[in-house]
Structures are given as structure tokens and as C-alpha cells.
Image: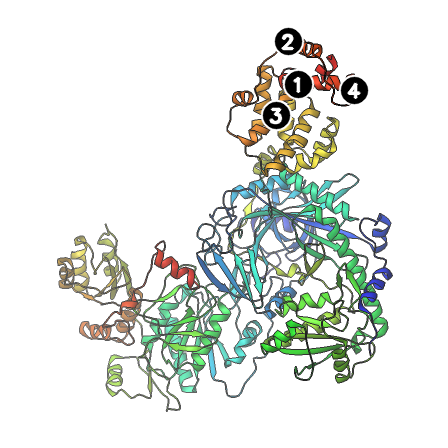
Amino acid sequence: MEDKTFQGYKGRALDILKKYDVHVWDKAEVDTTRGHFSGKILPRAENTDDLHIVMKVITGYNIGLDIETITHMKGERDPQPNFKVPEKEFPYTKGLPHVKLLGTGGTIASRLDYRTGAVIPAFSPGELFGAVPELADICNLDTEKVFAVFSENMSPKEYMALANKIGDEVKNGIDGIVIGHGTDTLAHTATALTYMCQNLPMPVVLVGSQRSSDRPSSDAALNLMHAMTAAGHGDIAEVMVCMFGPTSDEYGFLHRGTRVRKMHSSYRSTFRTIGDTPLATISRKNGVQPIKEIYNHRRKGAEREVEIITNLQDYKKSIATNNPNITRIVPTFDDRVAILYYYPGMKPDVLEALIEKGYKGIVWDGTGLGHVNKGMFDAIQRATDAGIHQYMCVQTIWGYTHMFVYDTGRDLMARGIIPADNMLAESAYIKLGWALGLSHDREEVRQLMLTPINSETTPREPYDGYLIYQGGVPEVEEFVHKVHK
Amino acid sequence: MNNINPQQNYELSKKAIGYVDRKQATQADYDRIGFMSGLETHQQLNTKEKLFCHCPAGIFQKSDEYDAELLRHMRPTLSEMGGYDGTALMEFKTRKNIIYRISNKTACTYDVDDTPPFPLNREALQYALEIALASKLNIVGEVHVTRKQYLDGSIPTGFQRTAILGVEGEIPLKHKKVRLIQLSIEEDACREVSDIGHTRIYRTDRLGMPLIETVTAPELKNPDEVKEAAQYIRFLNRSTGHVRTGIGAGRQDVNVSCKGGTRIEVKGVSHTKWIPDVTHYECFRQWALLAIRDQLNRRISKQNWKMNYMELNPKKFKFYFSPITDAIAQNKKIYAVNLPEFAGLLSHFCQPGRPFYDEFVNRLKVIACLERPNMATSEDIDDVVSSHVFDEIRSAMNAGEQDAQIIFWADDDDVQTALDTIEERALMAFDGVPSETRKVMYDATTIFERVLPGADRMYPDTDSAPIPLTNEYIESLKQNIPDEIADRYAQCTQWNIPEDCFTYIFSNNHYPMIKRIINELDITPKFAGTFFGHTLKHLHGQYGRIPFCTCRIYHLFAFLKQKNINYGIAKNMLKIMFEHPEMEFENILKELHFQTLTETELIQKAKDLAKQPFVAYRKNTNNQDRINTIMGQLHYMGIGNINLGKLAEEL
């Protein structure tokens, strides 16, 4: 076990603690050239300097002492406090749906980590019940920590593991699945699971929080309640993201996994469906209220079968058979795929490097209708010649590629770039990795890419699919004044 | 039949505990009940921006001036040391909808907790450190921002970002030194617009403004001492010239306990003049609660005490009190609660005008969200429910002679919380004084506000990096530290400035200007002191504010000195400066019809006047009347040219 006697201290601060035999968690009296201080010695966050010692004074505040000023220290041993969320047995209620919560990490539930000074997740049904007792009124809960990684450390390996886990739960007859996830790459995971878990009989709801649950104003509890409700009671059997609608604690949205994007670095209402309306609203009071009329309905009582598919032949066969009772789990991924975000002045060597490294797929995030500069043309041709599958998305985020409008677009298509319509770049990246996991044949991959599994491309963009109002004009200000943000 | 006369019982119990009015109270009285008090004074800093964002500080809106609203709820969280805070859990019970009103001018996404904090405002840090140094505190080596939970919603994050800058200081009062526990820098909270039922509305203009909190040790032994300490800290803060003034810019929380009592925090005493009454009442309230405790424990043990209750059918029980009849009309539930062995205690004196049952009233308001009036008791001073009804209730509940009853009315959803609240408070009576924070009312009595939060609600702010305070930085700040308030008091006394000038001079930080005028211009300290402490104070009060920089007063005297004009005219000029802040001194003199006359010329004029026949208006006149008449005529001519006293002497 790691020695925590001087947790987080290093260099000169560590020397001082050792010199006076003062340990972390000790009650200490410290004399300094700036006067006397007394309190409990706390661990120090790892990436900070070695010039200060952290202390909690009697009033509960933390302070730092400059080691240069310390003239004497005296420590008295005191036990380390226990940081557990109060754990209670999650009650079983007959008649409520069974929901499985799969934990991946993230800030749905968390506590402080002294090592980094940051928050780390804490997760178990009992802990969750201790923190959000309302959950027991919604469903019967079972949890499983699939892995504990921060959102940014999620990768195709984890997507595939989750897909297999979902397959297992489908077989077990679960009523709904909730996946706790950090918000940074929540949308990536949602889109990956959409491709990997097709024709689901019940909802799979991904949920996170924008304010960690160590804060009284956290959105975690409400998001979790919404997600459990959508998973246990909702009729929409798709892979969805469930997060705040407005920044107010009022209702949440259910977003289709392929069309959702995190649009603000810190707002609670950061997730938005792009190019369409969200699937539904969700609230404690009204439950799931669908906005979209067409969606995959929950299959009640039907036979549940699961097919695990890892090659194109089986996949095509399964699609052709189209058995409504069969859930397809397609956990494949070729991770030699990259997104290239075009910028003015971009040089072809960026692309050359990817060719040289043996990449198999590139998603271009082009300007406007889907463009990059002329200087890239030769390299793009070389990439195609090297067998790289190249797709074009738009960095405008909203809208379709239209590569016939300008010469540049036509030139790019002539060199092998395929327009990906209104697929989000992140969605296209995941789908290309997934498709290349099934085949490297240019035409087969193209078929897979351009045949939507669940709205990653849409045939039409409704008028209310693009709403970004600007403040300052009377009608918008009036709206903002009237409706809770 | 219960034969307690509530009014009589209230008066008798007041006498029984030995309550004395503050004006009659002596140190012996305070020693008898073990008066003990400490202060937490809050003072806004005069910075351009807020503490953790770049919104302007010090711009305020009316409650209906807002661009958007948003709604939040607060949930208790686990503290760093592993426990839930008592206040936190209680406030969660109340299930409040918190509405924030936001104006674009004064609040940004940080204020409503949709953006992490920006680095701590360095201007604020500097001002706060200067005050910490002036308070002789031990300055920390590194500033750690901490989160202090507030679940009332007054801060949208649910916590206040705050950091200690110094610990263990002291301030000298007239007769003793008082230790300071700590000084912290923190962000101010929202201002409440309303709090009705389950909805509380806040505006976010004041939110996030930097302020400092100075905490004294609980060493103050009588109400006047508490006030003196508060004044001292206020003057010290103001002496740096970096703090805001005006309503709400300085506020005190006063901690009070009596012997055997509990530390009670009375929040938001916005004027030091209220402190003596507030602390006096609070100390005696605790003394009264201890008397109630003793009586109760003599009657029954806490373990054996059990409350019972019943729902009242409004058809069976006749009510005429309009809040109850309204409640019935709104389909609310009416409940009766029997408190065994509480007879004579509900109407027991606690504070002037507030018998013991008031403790239940305000807990029901805060915890169960029941708007006042929310209950009636069998011992109401103004009986709103007839004794017949209580007789019926008593027989329906098999209540004993020694029992007391409460009736409350509430929405179905709130009934359980209300019952829990009543039971909880009744049980607390067995232990004496419950830990809580209290809110001060207009008459200096207090009502329940929240359970007293403990150190458990502190949590390190993981969004902010620690800020090291180097020795070089601290040394450089020491250059700006004003001299001590105690030394300034002594200096003013030595200068013969009358003591009635002190409060005005120090609360407005005029001392540095007075000192400069005395040192640089040929003016007697007493004149300069009374010029500020009387003349300026009078005009300041009359006009509500000083419309110019007080450096203008320095320039005024410098001008008079240069022109060789007697300083006596300055008082007349000052009045014109209030009316026309921009007017040049020359023009002010013209406005006063001032003309230069030599002493000889003036004395000649006086002699001329003396030659004229003196018309007496009264029967009996003497020579002094004659001189006064001449002086009256010469006053305008003389002022500025001669010391009028000297002229009178000449006559």
C-alpha cells in the first residue's frame, strides 16, 4: 500500500515535515516569522509547489504556510477522517422497473481527491441512494462499475466493452440502462453505442453532470433522476443522452446519440441536438414527453435475442433478415482513423504524416460547404491512392456538405473525398472507425457510412433544427425575460 | 380546563428569570447571566470588479429590473471531513424553489454558476491584506480558496468562495484588548426579493462583490463593549480608504451566549447602534430558555416525553380566525398537536414581545414553509382561537392539565415537515438553547433563521489554485498601512478635538485629511477637528452626502492662507461648496460679498457704528447688548478679515 504519511508533499516541504516529525492529518502547532498557526495538516495536491504546507484551521478553512517562515512545528497524531458517502441499502420496490446503472467514471457522483486536489467519482447503489434517495421512487437499481476513467480517457476499447455489456443486459431482460459518463466525450460514446447496439428493446440513457455532486447546486441528482425515469419508464428504446434542457432545474432533454453535441464548456444546458429537435423532454412531474413522432419504441414482453456481429458478412445478413426481436451488438472498431480540422494555411505535411503512419480513415472538417485549400489537393490524392477512406463534414456544425456548388468541392470529390451530408464530424469519425472495423472495401465502407443507422445523417433539416438566437434584440430579450433560462 | 393567563404568565416568568431593561442593566447583571459575545464584521471592499469575475461591483438594481430569471434547487453534499452539515439537511427539507433574477449589467454566467471562477481579484486581495495587516493578524503563506456551504440559495453555487488571509490578531479597546480569530476575504451573497411559501426570489447584483470578514474571539462582556469593538473594527476598515460605505456595505453578525447557553449567531445587524439591544435581548432569551429547560425537566424526562397530534375536522371545530378560515377554504389541513407538560411554558417570556411559542412560529415558517400566521396555541397572548375550542381539542386528545396545545394549518405536503419541526423544537427545549442562526428584526429582537452551520460545511475550492503570498509582497503592502485607530484616538484627544467629533471623523475616515491640514497649514488642531466633526458633519447630514472630494477642504484652507484671509470664513464658504461643488473659491468669496478690510479699518467702522444712537428694543439694555448689535452689523464685513472674537474684545 502507498505510504500516505506525507501524502502529496515533496522536496523542501517534505523535509520540513520530516524534520519536525509532523504527519499529514496531525494536529499541529506551527511558529513562523509571521506568527503562530494551529490546525490540522492536510495532504498537498501533487502538481503544486514544494514551498507550502496546507493546514485546516479550527474554523474549517484551509490555509497554506510558507516553509521559509516556519521556525518550529509540533505535531500530535490524529486519525484520518473517513470520506465515504453514507451508504444505505437500495430498497427494492415491487412493480418498479429494473434499471441497470453502468459506471464509467465522470462526475455523476464524486468526492474530493487530495492527491490532485480534484474530484473523483464514488459509485455504488448504496452510495447513490445515500446521495439521491428519490431514485428509490423511480426504479429498482443495480449498478456495475464497468471502468473508472475520466471522459477524455474513453476510447474505442471502452465503447466495445460497453456494447458487449449492453448485449448481456438485453439478454438478462433489463428494463433500461443508464450509463454514467463524464460530459466531455459523452456524445462520442453515445454515437458509438448507437452503431454498436442496434435495434434495442429498451432505452440506453447516457447521463453526466456539469457540476460535480460535491456542490449543492449540482445538476447530477436531477440528471440522474431524469435518466432513471427515461430508462425505466420511457418508451423510446434508443441510445440517448439525457442532460439539462435549460440551465434552470426544470426539465431535461433526451437527445439522439448521433446528433448530440456538447456546445458550452461549462453551462448545465450544454448538450444540444444539432440540425433537428431533441427526441423528448423529461421532467420529474411529466416524465418523458416525446417531441419527435418517429422513434424506436420499447418492445414489451417480446422475445429478446442478441446477435454479436464482428464481420461484414454477418452484419449484412442480419440487416437483410431484419428480425424485429434481434438486437445486433456490433463491437468493431479500427482506430486508425483521424479527424482533420481544416484551417487557412494548412500544409499538406499534416496529411502526409497520417499517410505515412498508416491511417485508414480521415474525416475532414472543412470550411463552408465542405472545402479545403488547393495546396492539399495532391496530398489528398495520395491518401486516396494509399487506400485511405476520406469523408467530408462541415466545421460550421450545422448544415449539409454541398460539394457540387463550387469547383473546389468537385475537385475534392475527384480526388476521393466523399461528402458525409450533415453528419457531425465526431459522429462521422466514430462511424468511420466502426465501419472500418467491418470492412476496408471502399464501396462497402461507403455504403455503411451513408446508410443512416439512427439519424446520423438526416434527409431533411426542419426549420427549428437550427436555433441560435442572439441577445440584444427586443424579441429575444423579451423571450429570455419571460422564460426561465 | 386550563387556567393559565398567558399575559400574566409572561410577565411573571419575565420577573422570575430576573430580566432587567438594558438601560437599568449593570455589569453585575451581565455577570450574573454570563453575558459573552463575539463579532463577525463584514465589510465590502471598494473594488472596481467582483471577486471572481469581471462584472462591475457596486451597481444595484431594483427588484423588478432584470433581464432573465432562472430556477435552482439546493441539495446537501458531503463535506471534506466526511459529514453532512445540519443546516444543509434542514434546508433540504424545505424544498425551496430558488429563483434568481439576473441583469446583464451586473451578473454573468459565473454568478449563476454556469462558468468556473476567474482568478481572484488582485485589487481586492491587496485591500483585504492591508486591513489584515492593520489588524495585526498573522498573514498566511498561501491563500486557499474554500467553499462554505449556504443552502438557503443566497449564492447560486450553494457555497460561498472564501479564503483566510490572517489569524490571531488583536484590537485595543478603551479598557482591554480583544483578540481577533481571523480575517477572510469572501464573495457577497444575493439580495433577497421575497420568500413566500416554497418560492424564494433573489437578485444577483450584490452577489460576488468582495468583502472581508473580521472575527473576534468571544471576549466581550457587555452590550456596550460589543458595540465599541464593532465601531473599532469599522473605523479600522475605513481608515484604509478602500472600503465601501453606505447601507449594507458594512454588516455585523453577532455571536452571543449566556452562562450554560449556546453560541447563537445573530445575522445581518447592519448598524452598530443596534448591537447593544440585540445582544442584550439575545442573552436574556437564552437565560429564559434555560429556565424553561429546568422547569420541563422537573416535570418529565426527555426520554418519556412523547408528542401526539390529530387532524381537526373543520366541521366539528369552529374557527373564526381569518387565517384559519382562509386555510380551510383553500383545502389546507388543520392539525392540533398536544405538547405534554408544556403548560405555562409556551407563554413563558423569551424576548420582549416574544413568548416561547414564537420559537415554533418561525421554525414552521423557515423549515416547513408555512407563511405566518401559521399557528395558534393554547397560551396565545392575543387569543385567536377561543378557549372552548382548545377545551374540545384537549378532551378529544385526552390532554392533561399540564399539557399545552398548538394548532397549525398547512398544505397536505407540508404537514409531516411541520409535525417534525414542532416535535424537534419541543425536544430541544429539554436541552436548553438550540444551535441556530437568528435574524434581527426592526425592534432588535430576533427570530429563528437557520440551524447554526458548523465547520463541516467547509470544502476546498477545487476550481481555484492556491495563491502564494511572498514576504516581499507583504513587506511592500506594509508601506500602505494606516496608523492605528487607537493611536489616532489618542492624537485627537491630545489635539483637544472634542470627543463628540470622533465617530463622524473615524466612520468617514476624515482623520488623514485633518492631519494633513494641521501639519501643512497654519491651523489649530481643535479648529480643524471641529470644522470636520461639527461643521462638515452638519452639512453632510443636511445634504445627505458630500458632493466633492474632502481634498477640496484642504485646498480651501490653503487658498485662505495664501490670500491671508481669516479661516473663520471657511464655514460660510463650505455651505456654498455644498450647493455649488464646482464653484471656484474666488467666486464663493464674491457670493459672500467678501471685501478685504484691514483690522484698523474694521475697528474704525466699529467705532463709527458705536457713535450712532443705539436703539434699544427691550426695556433693560446693557452694554453687552450694544456690543452684540454692532457685532451683528459688522459680522459680514469682519468674517474672513479678523477673528471675530478679537473684534468683540476690541469693542
Q: Amino acid at mark 4?
A: Thr
Q: Secondary structure at mark 1?
A: helix
Q: Amino acid at mark 3?
A: Asn
Asked if residue A77 lies left or right of residue A277, the reply is right
State the image coordinates of residue B632 (x, y, percent, origin top left).
68, 20
Q: Determine which residue is flagged by label 1.
A: B633
- Letter of the chain that mark 2 sits on in the rendering: B
Q: Amino acid at mark 1?
A: Gln
Instruction: Of the two numbered discs 3 and 2 on the same chain, state the one appearing first in sequence.
Output: 3
The Cα–Cα distance between marks 1 and 3, rounded to whole angstroms, is: 16 Å
| Marker disc for residue B572 | 3
Does the CB distance between marks 3 and 2 fall below 8 Å? no
Q: Amino acid at mark 2?
A: Glu
| Marker disc for residue B601 | 2
Instruction: Of the two numbered discs 2 and 4 on the same chain, state the one appearing first in sequence.
Output: 2
- Tell me the crowding category of disc 3: few under 14, some 14 to 19, or many 20 or more residues within 10 angstroms, Cα based: some
The Cα–Cα distance between marks 3 and 4, rounded to whole angstroms, is: 30 Å
Q: Secondary structure at mark 4?
A: loop
Q: Is residue A72 visible?
A: no
Label 3 or label 2, whichever lies nearer to me, is 2
Label 2 or label 4, whichever lies nearer to me, is 4
Instruction: State the residue at coordinates (38%, 57%).
Output: A477
Above or below, comparing residue A184 to residue B239 in the picture: below
| Labels 1 and 2 share a subunit | yes
The Cα–Cα distance between marks 3 and 2, rounded to whole angstroms, is: 22 Å
- Tell me the crowding category of disc 1: few under 14, some 14 to 19, or many 20 or more residues within 10 angstroms, Cα based: few
